[in-house]
Image: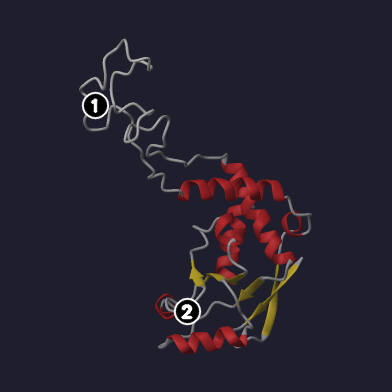
Amino acid sequence: MKCPVHNIDGKETGSIDLPDEIFNKPVNTDVIHQAIVMYQASLRQGNASTKERGDKRGGGRKPYRQKGTGRARVGSNRSPLFSGGGITFGPHPRDFGYSIPKKIKMAALKESLNVKFKDQNLLCLDDVSKSFEKTKEFAKALENLKIKGKTLAMLDGSDPSLNRVTRNIRSFNQVRSQDVNAYDIMRNKKILITKTALENILKRIS
């Protein structure tokens, strides 16, 4: 399998070989699902909190006498049965995060790249040595590359000025190839990756 390589002007300058054992196979959606659910769970804040009867203020005096009223016996008006009482089995702050095996995480990363390649949403770019002064200059380069929609860029080996000029581009996110995961890739429509970044990520998943 070969992936075309373009320059910053949008012209094809060559290609890079992709391993057949990753990019010439059907997509395994099961491992992608497992990884994405795990990453999404770790993003949950888990801040919901309720008060039980012991956390409520008051309730020290018995509401009414034990016998003779015909009603059920009650020792506190902070019982969950009373208005203003505590909550039974309510939520409390917790950590929803959990982990899956590293092999599944790596398999999900492979399969997510395979998905983008098969959908023709993976664009390989020559390392950008040109320095950009303004955001609109790089935005024009994205037009030349026909990049539209939510985009994730891995620009390893490129000029450091790209970190600055890409900040204000809407729906454009940048991440290092050693930090990217399956969730980052699948939540973006397009993947823009330099040759250096692609070589780095292929080393990670091989």
Query: How packed is label 1: few (under 14 Cα within 10 Å), some, or many (20 or more)?
Result: some
Q: Mark 1 or 2 closer to N-term? A: 1
User: Residue 59, which numbered label?
Assistant: 1
Could one spot residue 135 in this view of the protein?
Answer: yes
CA separation, marks 1 and 2? 57 Å
Dot 2 corresponds to which residue? 169
Image location (x, y in percent) of residue 61: 20, 22
Image location (x, y in percent) of residue 203: 60, 56
Image location (x, y in percent) of residue 1: 77, 65
The residue shown at (49%, 69%) is 174
Residue 46's place in the image compared with 158, above or below, is: above
Could one spot residue 156 in this view of the protein?
Answer: no
The residue shown at (73%, 67%) is 119
Amino acid residing under circle 1 = Gly
Secondary element at image label 2: loop
> Which quadrant holds residue 184?
bottom right
